[in-house]
Amino acid sequence: MAKKQIVIDPVTRIEGHAKITIQLDDEGVVEDAHFHVTQLRGFEKFCEGRPFREMPSLMARICGICPVSHLMASAKACDALMAVKIPPVGAKLRVVMNLAQITQSHALSFFHLSSPDFLLGLDSDPATRNIFGMIEKYPDLARDGIRLRKCGQEIIAILGGKKIHPAWVVPGGVSEPLDEERRDKIVAMLPEALEIILRTLDWFKASLKNYEEEIATFANFPTLFMGIVGEGGLLHHYDGKLRIVDSARNIIKDGIEAHEYRKYIGEAVEPWSYLKSPYFKPLGYPEGIYRVGPLARLNIINRIGTPKADDEWLEFRKLDRHAVMSSFHYHYARLIEILYAVERMNEILHDEDILSTHVRAYAAPNCEVGVGMSEAPRGTLMHEYHIDKHGLMKSANLIIATGHNNLAMNRGVLQVAKHYVKGKELKEGMLNRVEAVIRAYDPCLSCSTHATGQMPLHVQLVDRRGTILSELKRN
């Protein structure tokens, strides 16, 4: 017997293309829901046969939003193939560029994609519930978002020569050292960024009381959390080892090296999505559900490591005596990570050796397999490369940060749909909340496809005979 189904296609205000389906029974009660990634990313296949040294620049083309993240993971995989330790200043400069990427991407997610919901209301008119409506009604906040994102992008451009797809990060380090003039230019930008993120945190924390229902229902359930931690359990986005904790913040597994990831992370596939569903192998599939990204990173660390961000993290920890469970708080975690990024970039750029010209190690390939791992804005990113004796790519396996969250996003869609979607009459605010739980994760589906122009939405609720019971359209 046919089921009633709501289809949200595409999901709006995310990076890339996806849809959501919600199945209802005869009484309009939600029975199931799925988040579908509808495009295929083929980078693993068409990199085969390429020289491994080309991989960082090639992998950066996976996405125009987070090219630096793929640069980092790819370059680290190539470092492993060469079996070299890159010069310390080369590593520091990579860290700065990665933190600039964290800053610009988190600012895009928070201000441009999600803030229209916070500022204009989840039930507001969708015709104006967007960045343009936000600019008109809250120009100062919109300006802050633009300035903060610009800061991150300008730092990337100063270091790498351009804002998108810089080729500066290379196997063995970086291709060019930093000089005093460019260093000072970056440092001069950071005070404004610090002012913006501090006032944004003040505003957002004060607004949390308005979203108690959403906090309770936006993918708020126990899972594992995974991410990279540095020495002493410090927050680190570039280098470190994997840590996995449970919902009580008990460490389940610690100190996992990049090359060991297959021992602990399995990859399942489902017929309704091109996005893989990674899981924690010891618990099996799908019980081994975990989350990555800013919320996970703040749940697994012992402390952040910069003064103002540590203070904010301690306040964040008060949300829950164990791990912070609600995926709504991804937004809060992003702001804290921006604050950390600004503070940490300033610290690194004042290191005495930062202008050293020794920034790259050179070597032939010495290993047949190399794994690179770093933290992208959305979570842990893994690149595994296999090469032949000539240094040509035989195969690649990529686990994109968004993929790690696939099981959690699907469960979150079901939780929100069960809470908000009821009866035979659709209300736009119901469906926006189903989309908003996905926006909380800030999925980067640009890795699969790039879109331009308008993104229309057409939702129909039909009964088993195909009769349209309710319908909504967006231009």
Image (cartoon, rainbow, N blue to C red):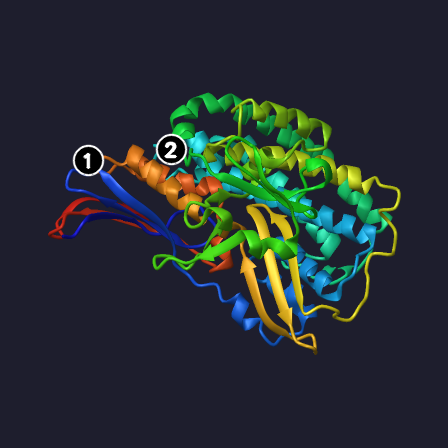
**Label 1: which residue?**
423
In the figure, 1 relative to 429: above or below?
A: below
The answer to whether the residue labelled 1 contacts the one labelled 2, judged by CB atoms less than 8 Å apart, is: no
Q: State the residue at coordinates (80%, 48%).
A: 182
Q: Earlier in the sequence, mark 1 or mark 2?
A: 2
In the image shown, does 93 or 459 lie closer to the viewer? 93
Is residue 143 visible in the rendered image? The answer is no
Whether residue 382 sits left or right of residue 158 in the image: it is left
State the SS at label 1.
loop
Q: Give the image location of residue 423, x and y in percent.
A: 19, 35
State the SS at label 2.
loop
Query: Which amino acid type is shown beneath numbered disc 2?
Result: Leu
Whether residue 388 sits left or right of residue 117 in the image: it is right
Q: Give the image location of residue 454, x and y in percent.
A: 39, 53
Query: Dot 1: few (<14), some (14–19), or many (≥20) neighbours within 10 Å?
Result: few
**Label 2: which residue?**
122
